[in-house]
């Protein structure tokens, strides 16, 4: 008797985004759901979690008809979904977020100590006992926020759990905790639908894998019967070589040099050099200060110490604001593209020309034809999938949104590009496009600093990888010098001497 | 010294009911008005201050106003502050004829004499609290009738006229409308509409324009104050009916003087804003000096209203 | 509606015309229905006279509403417009009466006064990162007080010297109406076709994203408030010209009428979305309603209740329209 049964489910907005998809989920089973961006994974799971209503098909839970009118109703029946977008309230504490809607109270007053105690227990379950439950969620890094979000969904009765890209922001340590927890849930008979692009992860924990493409069900197989390449082929419809070998090539002159950069305890005395035509990776655990370092270079935060030199100049560059950074030829692809990168309700066209509006205007007046031409070319070059360049960015999938952010900096034609988790939530096909683009940019002589939590990705695309740990830049590896083990050791090194990172 | 004075005052108050302890110093009089943004009260305040300067030896004056005409709560607060300030008498132009009665009662209970000017406190409400408060002021209805009668000389029976009323909830607005209506009834003119222009120029203009469109044969607009009359004159001009539609106002503010001279405004009434406060103050000072208790003060003292046509 | 953020411009002229009309259809239909209703209820409503009066009545509100549209688009609000109108009219009135300035100079002075107050609104809220709600609330009081001081709290009768702006010159329309139309057209062009307009929309949508894209939001915001002030100053003198007098009490509560008009026109209070043309329709709806209700002799309480209901219903309808449109996109 399956726990959940969905029969030829479909969802049509203007055009169908999902059609005739059937699936079964047994108790204690992990079903991996994968496919390219826009394949319909999110839509399918949102149907199950009650966030979206199907336009065709039927669902059953425990052999009884199941048609949740809202997420709340689905949750009452034990169906929960951890969304890719964080659903936490940043101003409330970790404990308050965890206990939202079921706070222990007496006579209408919250029993704070009881609430904090329960929250601590809940966090310990996924290995986060180091976080103070009284910390406001907004003060945590994105990785920790993700863990809190997962912990929140494990509170109370949970029979069917949907995890949408849960590891996108997690360090391997945190991932291990998560997987241990998933195994425990399996043993307790919880059915789990696990969406991920990380095929190695799927192989580790999934019982079966289901592949979607263009809103259709392509295949479902036992995980034991497939190898990674099979899945990739099913997803994209053709072979993709995962192991790209970036040619080692001559790098140009110094494009940017950082000397002794610091801000409080977050970034401490960081120095390094970047060359034109080079992709410098920046690895480290969540909270190691990588994003903060990019923001310092970009002038988004004020630095306490240090200097930034551009193009080998001995006079330090004055970069007091992002405006100054952009004027000096530095661009930033933000980690959180929804709140910091894109103007979501506005057209692709508008988002793409934001940083270089001069190129599409004359004396303060826009030149729509010129803009259309330029954005059209960029879209084509980057392979943005959209109806037209007038489509709002909000309607694009994560990968395509990221391509639009890229388009902005290609349009600006800057010399130094700072990339913060550029492939977060981006599927394999779109990732390959982005890697291609990075190489083209490197060939064009741009210097790039790329933060990523995915070591394999860094090892694949970078010329050198710098590793940060506890705010310090501990080591820079050259291509050929690194191994996954060595990179990880460096990432943990800063914490060993003093204390373990908040965990 | 201070506690002694206080206890003496308390003793005196206990001994003589509402008697005020003030005989050995100059009486302190508070003038509490409505909006100082209104020219009428501006003039009133200046008149009062000028009077006090001439009679500096006889009394001290604290003048206060509120932000806008309808901010009753603010006016109540001011009166309470004045009570705390231990003034001997309050001369009040109430923003609301009923809502101010309770705080007037507080003042009287604390031994402060209250004289009512400009807008008459509601008789029923006063009676209920067992209060007598002298009203010093003009008869607005009589004044409006004076203006209306002057206009009537140029009208004949059956002519259509419109009335622009002030804020309809105020006693003055109602009285002036009533006065206009009395005069129109006498001559047999038809009042086709009474609409509120909220005492304001813009609102008056909008309402007057609408009336002129709806009644193309309108002969006159009777306005509850001069600001609305200014708006009405502009509306008449816009409609291209200058001269055909007569406009009258009320209050005789400076801004209408050129209009009267040009004949765009037929007439207005002057109820001597400056003098009203002065009358009130004089009565208050006299009563304080004579130690007249509140309930022995005269009921009403009518001040003059004059027709102004030039 | 002409939605600058997400509309899909058609390539052909006919297509773009159809698109444009479609954008305005709902508001236009509401307007036509109101006119029809009042024409039925009142004998004289449906006449050239009525429409000309309304046309010559609205320029001040139109000018102020255009400024307010810009301010709302950058997710700000300007509560001081009514007071700024009174202050600039007062100063201009004094200049004409006491210093014997010409009308042209007085107009420039009024616009200057408005621009300065608007600049202060913008600069203060940007420099100290204060919500514009608070800063302009302060300016509402400051400008009103200054207007009382300037006029000694007395209405200044200016007379014919200033009436030129409001006297009919062309088919019964006044120069101020023509100026208002010019402002609407120019502002719509600025909003949809200029870099400044694009930056306004961007800042209203996501200020942090704009900053990280290298666009400095501060000068844009200050300029928007300065423009709103300038237009309020111009509105003040238009108002004074229509009434031939500068009243220090003029424009009390105007900010609310203006915000209502802009919101009826579909501009979002949350910023990032709006249209000047639709604001113009919003002003028309409010003023037709006001004129119609006065003409059928509705009592003051009735007028208020009906106006309030119209505002709420209009915004609810706009919300539905917006939802349908974004689903279609």
Image (cartoon, coloured by chain):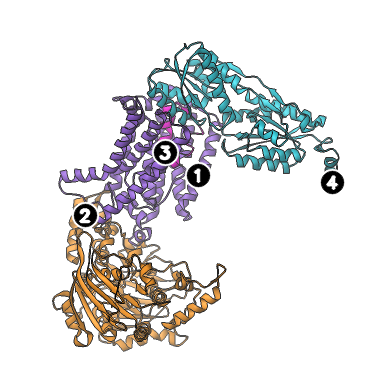
Who is closer to the viewer here, A98 or C212? Answer: A98
Q: Are marks 1 and 2 on the same chain?
A: no
Instruction: Give the Cα separation between the discs numbered 3 and 4.
Output: 59 Å
**Mark 3 secondary-structure assignment:** helix
The subunit letter for the residue under badge 2 reads A
**Mark 2 secondary-structure assignment:** helix
Query: Which of the image's four quarters has the N terminus of chain A?
Result: bottom left
Q: Residue furthest left?
A: A238
Q: Which residue is mark 2?
A: A371
**Proximity of marks 1 and 3: CB atoms separated by less than 8 Å:** no
Counting from the top left corner in percent of width and height, residue C288 is at 36, 34
Residue A276 seen anywhere in this rendered image of the structure: yes
Q: Which residue is mark 3?
A: C306
Q: Are marks 3 and 4 on the same chain?
A: no
Instruction: Give the Cα separation between the discs numbered 2 and 3.
Output: 46 Å
Residue A501 to residue B29: above or below: below
**Mark 4 secondary-structure assignment:** helix
Residue C24 to residue A13: above or below: above
Magenta residues, dominant SS class:
helix
Q: Which residues are magenta?
A: C230-256
The subunit letter for the residue under badge 1 reads C
Q: Are marks 4 and 1 on the same chain?
A: no
Q: Which residue is mark 1?
A: C139
Query: Which of the image's four quarters has the C terminus of chain A?
Result: bottom left
Query: Marks 4 and 1: which is nearer the front?
Result: 4
Counting from the top left corner in percent of width and height, residue C136 is at 48, 46
**Mark 1 secondary-structure assignment:** helix
The chain drawn in purple is C
The chain drawn in orange is A
**Proximity of marks 2 and 4: CB atoms separated by less than 8 Å:** no
The subunit letter for the residue under badge 3 reads C
């Amino acid at each position: 008797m399956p726990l959940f049964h969905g029969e030829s489910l479909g969802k049509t907005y203007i055009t169908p985004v999902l059609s005739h998809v059937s699936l079964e989920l047994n108790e204690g089973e992990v079903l991996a759901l994968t496919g390219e961006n826009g394949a319909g994974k999110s839509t399918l799971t949102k149907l199950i979690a009650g966030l979206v209503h199907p336009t065709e098909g039927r669902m059953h839970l425990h052999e009884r008809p199941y048609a949740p009118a809202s997420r709340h109703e689905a949750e009452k029946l034990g169906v929960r979904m951890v969304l890719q977008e964080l659903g936490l309230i940043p101003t409330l504490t970790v404990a308050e977020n965890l206990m939202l809607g079921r706070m222990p109270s007496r006579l209408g007053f919250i029993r704070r100590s009881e609430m904090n105690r329960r929250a601590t227990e809940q966090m310990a379950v996924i290995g986060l006992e180091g976080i103070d439950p009284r910390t406001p969620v907004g003060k945590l890094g994105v990785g920790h926020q993700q863990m809190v979000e997962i912990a929140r969904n494990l509170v109370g009765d949970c029979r069917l759990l949907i995890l949408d890209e849960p590891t996108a922001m997690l360090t391997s340590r945190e991932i291990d905790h998560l997987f241990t927890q998933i195994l425990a849930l399996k043993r307790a008979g919880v059915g789990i639908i696990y969406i991920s692009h990380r095929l190695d992860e799927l192989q580790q924990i999934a019982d079966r894998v289901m592949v979607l493409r263009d809103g259709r069900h392509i295949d479902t197989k036992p995980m034991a019967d497939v190898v990674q390449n099979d899945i990739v082929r099913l997803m994209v419809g053709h072979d993709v070589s995962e192991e790209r070998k970036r040619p080692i090539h001559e790098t140009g002159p110094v494009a940017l040099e950082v000397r002794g950069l610091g801000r409080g305890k977050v970034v401490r005395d960081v120095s390094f050099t970047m060359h034109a035509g080079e992709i410098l990776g920046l690895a480290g655990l969540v909270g190691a200060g990588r994003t903060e370092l990019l923001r310092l270079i970009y002038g988004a935060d004020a630095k306490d110490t240090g200097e930034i030199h551009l193009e080998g100049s001995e006079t330090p560059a004055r970069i007091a604001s992002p405006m100054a950074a952009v004027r000096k030829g530095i661009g930033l692809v933000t980690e959180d593209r929804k709140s910091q990168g894109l103007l979501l309700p506005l057209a692709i066209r508008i988002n793409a020309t934001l940083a270089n509006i001069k190129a599409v205007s004359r004396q303060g007046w826009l030149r729509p034809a010129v803009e259309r031409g330029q954005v059209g070319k960029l879209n084509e070059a980057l392979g943005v999938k959209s109806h037209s360049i007038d489509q709002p960015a909000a309607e694009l999938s994560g990968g395509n949104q990221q391509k639009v952010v890229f388009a902005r900096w290609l349009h600006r034609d800057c010399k130094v590009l700072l990339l913060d988790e550029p492939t977060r939530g981006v599927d394999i096909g779109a990732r390959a496009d982005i890697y291609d683009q990075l190489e083209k940019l490197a060939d064009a002589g741009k210097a790039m600093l790329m933060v990523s939590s995915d070591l394999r990705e860094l090892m694949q695309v970078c010329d050198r990888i710098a590793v940060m740990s506890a705010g310090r830049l501990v080591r820079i590896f050259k291509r050929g010098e690194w191994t996954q083990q060595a990179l990880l050791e460096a990432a943990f090194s800063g914490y060993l001497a003093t204390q373990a990172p908040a965990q | 010294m201070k506690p002694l004075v206080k206890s003496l005052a308390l003793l005196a108050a206990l001994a003589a009911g509402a008697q005020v302890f003030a005989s050995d110093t100059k009486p302190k009089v508070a003038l509490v008005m409505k909006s100082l943004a209104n020219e009428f009260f501006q003039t009133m305040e200046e008149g009062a201050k000028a009077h006090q300067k001439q009679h500096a030896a006889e009394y001290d004056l604290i003048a206060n106003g509120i932000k806008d005409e309808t901010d009753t709560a603010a006016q109540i607060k001011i009166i309470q502050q004045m009570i705390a300030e231990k003034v001997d008498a309050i001369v009040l132009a109430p923003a609301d004829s009923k809502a101010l009665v309770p705080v007037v009662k507080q003042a009287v209970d604390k031994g402060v004499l209250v004289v009512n000017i400009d807008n008459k406190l509601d008789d029923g409400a006063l009676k209920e609290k067992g209060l007598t408060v002298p009203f010093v002021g003009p008869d607005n209805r009589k004044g409006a009738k004076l203006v209306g009668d002057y206009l009537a000389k140029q009208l004949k029976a059956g002519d259509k006229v419109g009335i622009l009323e002030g804020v309809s909830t105020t006693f003055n607005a109602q009285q002036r409308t009533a006065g206009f209506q009395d005069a129109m009834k006498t001559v047999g003119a038809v009042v086709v509409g009474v609409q509120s222009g909220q005492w304001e120029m813009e609102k008056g203009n909008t309402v007057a324009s609408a009336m002129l469109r709806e009644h193309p044969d309108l002969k006159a607009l009777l306005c509850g104050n001069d600001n609305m009359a200014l708006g009405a004159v502009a509306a008449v001009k816009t409609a291209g009916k200058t001269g055909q539609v007569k406009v009258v106002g009320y209050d005789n503010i400076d801004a209408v003087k050129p209009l009267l001279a040009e004949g765009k405004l037929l007439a207005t009434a002057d109820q001597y804003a400056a003098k009203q406060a002065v009358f009130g103050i004089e009565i208050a000072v006299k009563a304080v000096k004579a130690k007249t208790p509140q309930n022995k003060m005269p009921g009403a003292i009518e001040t003059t209203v004059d027709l102004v046509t030039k | 509606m002409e939605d600058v953020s997400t509309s899909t411009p058609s390539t052909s002229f006919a297509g773009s015309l159809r698109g444009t009309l479609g954008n305005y259809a709902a508001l236009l239909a509401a307007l036509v229905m109101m006119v029809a209703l009042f024409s039925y209820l009142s004998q004289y409503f449906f006449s050239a006279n009525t429409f000309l009066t309304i046309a010559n009545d609205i320029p001040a509100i139109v000018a102020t509403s255009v400024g307010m549209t810009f301010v709302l688009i950058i997710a700000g609000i300007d509560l001081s417009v009514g007071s700024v109108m009174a202050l600039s009219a007062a100063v201009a009135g004094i200049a004409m009466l006491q210093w014997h300035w010409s009308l042209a100079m007085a107009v420039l002075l009024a616009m200057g006064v408005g621009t300065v107050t608007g600049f202060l609104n913008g600069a203060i809220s940007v420099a100290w990162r204060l919500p514009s709600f608070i800063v302009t609330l302060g300016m509402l009081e400051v400008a009103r007080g200054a207007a009382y001081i300037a006029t000694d709290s007395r209405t200044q009768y200016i007379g014919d010297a200033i009436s030129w702006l409001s006297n009919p010159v062309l088919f019964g329309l006044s120069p101020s109406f023509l100026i208002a139309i010019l402002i609407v057209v120019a502002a719509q062009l600025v909003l949809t076709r200029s870099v400044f307009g694009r930056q306004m929309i961007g800042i209203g949508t996501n200020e942090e994203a704009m900053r990280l894209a290298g666009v400095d939001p501060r000068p844009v915001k200050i300029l928007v408030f300065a423009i709103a002030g300038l237009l309020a100053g111009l509105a003040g003198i238009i108002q004074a010209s229509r009434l031939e007098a500068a009243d220090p009490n003029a424009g009390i509560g105007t900010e609310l009428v203006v915000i209502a008009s802009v919101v009826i026109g579909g501009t979002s209070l949350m910023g990032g979305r709006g249209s000047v043309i639709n604001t113009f329709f919003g002003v028309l709806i409010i003023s037709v309603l006001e004129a119609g209700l006065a003409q059928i002799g509705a009592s003051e309480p009735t007028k208020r209740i009906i106006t309030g209901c119209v505002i709420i219903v209009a915004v609810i309808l706009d919300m539905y329209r917006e939802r349908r449109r974004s689903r279609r996109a």
